[in-house]
Amino acid sequence: MTLPSANGTPDVAAPPTSVGEPQPPGTHPIAPLRWSDLPRLFVIVWRVAPLLFSFLRDRRRWIRWGAPLQRSAAFHERRARALVHHLSALGPAFVKLAQVFSARTDLVPEPYITHLSRLTDQVPPVPWPQLRAALEQAWGAAPESIVDDLDPVPLAAGSIGQVHRARYQGRDVVVKVLRPGVDVIVLRDARLARAIVAWLYRQWAHHHVRGFAIVLEEFDRHIPEEMDFEREAMQCMRMRERFANEPRLRIPMVEAALTRRDVIVMEYLEGTRIDRLDAELASGRVSARALNEMLIETYARMMLRDGVFHADPHPGNLLVDQQGRLVLLDFGMVIDVSVSTRKALFDTILAAISRDPDATAAGFFALGMIATDSTPDAMRDLVATLLDIAYSDTSMSDRAKVLAERVMRELLNWPIVLPGELVYFARTAALIEGVGVRYDSHFNSLRVASPVVMRLRGELLSALLGDDGHREPLVTFAATLGAMAGTAVSWVQGWTKKLRAPS
């Protein structure tokens, strides 16, 4: 922690940590703390410390020693509600962080995941007079002179921005306004949260603490981009252009003339939230299978083909319109993915599709998901177990029960950490799995993804091999052939088993 001296001299960096002491993970530096941060730091610690000590006592009764405390399901429910209460009270940065962590089942178990996901819908709106003043300042004129029928009642209120309906030149639009003063608050709180977790990591250098630190680092790196609505407009137009020939997907048109750093105006697109489609499915207007395939195909193209993907895929940003088309909203969090990461991810997905535990484990290592001191044999056994569970012909609840019995009890000791942009890819995977299971208890993302990825393989390989199509062709082509062969063998074995079964 760095603070200025009492006589007001500039901040001076703290002395380097002693050799051999665990270092906070990642390369993104933490901005120095200031004396003015201390009151806010105290508030955060005051609300978080009791919960932190409670979690530590789950492992050791007296923090440093002792047997684990026995916790009942009712206790976990009470503590999950307390966690949500304190995060909500801490403001928009912590509400936004809840969105990120609500998809991280590798770091946060139930019932905490469920309660964190509910927090995303509990943001009180900014009073209209304050928001109108912000609009007037951004546009340099009264909002009513720029757009028509501006509704003072918000259509949606998020932790970063607030959305209102209006009309512009005869078109239905939405006006999204940055919450006044939220940028300063969020950046400060993100910096303080990282400093707290970095201190905790020096006290307890566990890979799960490292996982929390990496999530916070990525949040700190990308949250300024999310609060820049001019950048969001550019990313939205870029994505709209990339998917211009996809009739099953709708992306709003941006009104560039009205967009500022803290205001964005876009086409209003109607639809039903992706997690509220029961009536549409019952009527047959929407197919759950087609919807899941469309989700997987869209994000595969973003992540693997374009290297630019929509990294805030919570249900409020994904709608389905009257024609059954997927509507994609909110491009504030768009992540660039390097070619090397895309190649490693593609090969790992293909290995998982072909049920090859050795290649899948090797992909985990290539993606930087495994601590360097882990043994390949141990990871191979874990991956084999996960693939067996993933491909079992059971309901999600049954698979979750088996997962809890065979893996989750030991997961704290497995050195799996999602690095960099994979933090956001995990959110996408969690969303797809969640939507699939909501409408089909036997949904299996790998089984649904297999034909989709195979159908896109030519398009993806062309993008991953480069413009000339000759960069590392043998490696990736071999992986593709292996995946296709593995999938074909699985199908043949399945049909053979059915034919041999007694009638």
Image (spheres, rainbow, N blue to C red):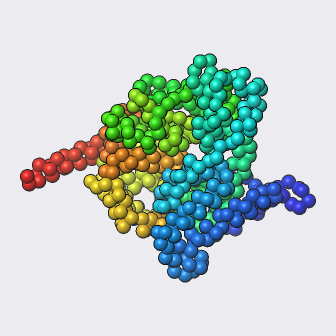
Q: Is residue 156 above or below residue 18?
A: above
At a point 22% along the width and 46% down the height, the residue shown is: 491
Q: Is residue 254 visible?
A: no
Q: Is residue 485 visible?
A: yes
Spot occupied by residue 190 in the image (x, y as percentages of width and height): 67, 52
- The residue nearer to you, when weighing 190 against 284, is 284
Q: Is residue 192 left or right of residue 11?
A: left
Q: Is residue 267 above or below residue 309?
A: above
Spot occupied by residue 20 in the image (x, y as percentages of width and height): 64, 68
Q: Is residue 46 left or right of residue 113?
A: right
At a point 42% along the width and 49% down the height, the residue shown is: 434
Q: Is residue 229 left or right of residue 141?
A: left
Q: Is residue 338 above or below residue 416?
A: above
Quadrant assignment for the N terminus: bottom right
Residue sitting farthest toward the right: 7
At a point 66% along the width and 49% down the height, the residue shown is: 92
Residue sitting farthest toward the left: 503
At a point 31% along the width and 57% down the height, the residue shown is: 388
Spot occupied by residue 337 in the image (x, y as percentages of width and height): 53, 41
Residue sitting farthest toward the bottom: 66
Residue sitting farthest toward the top: 169
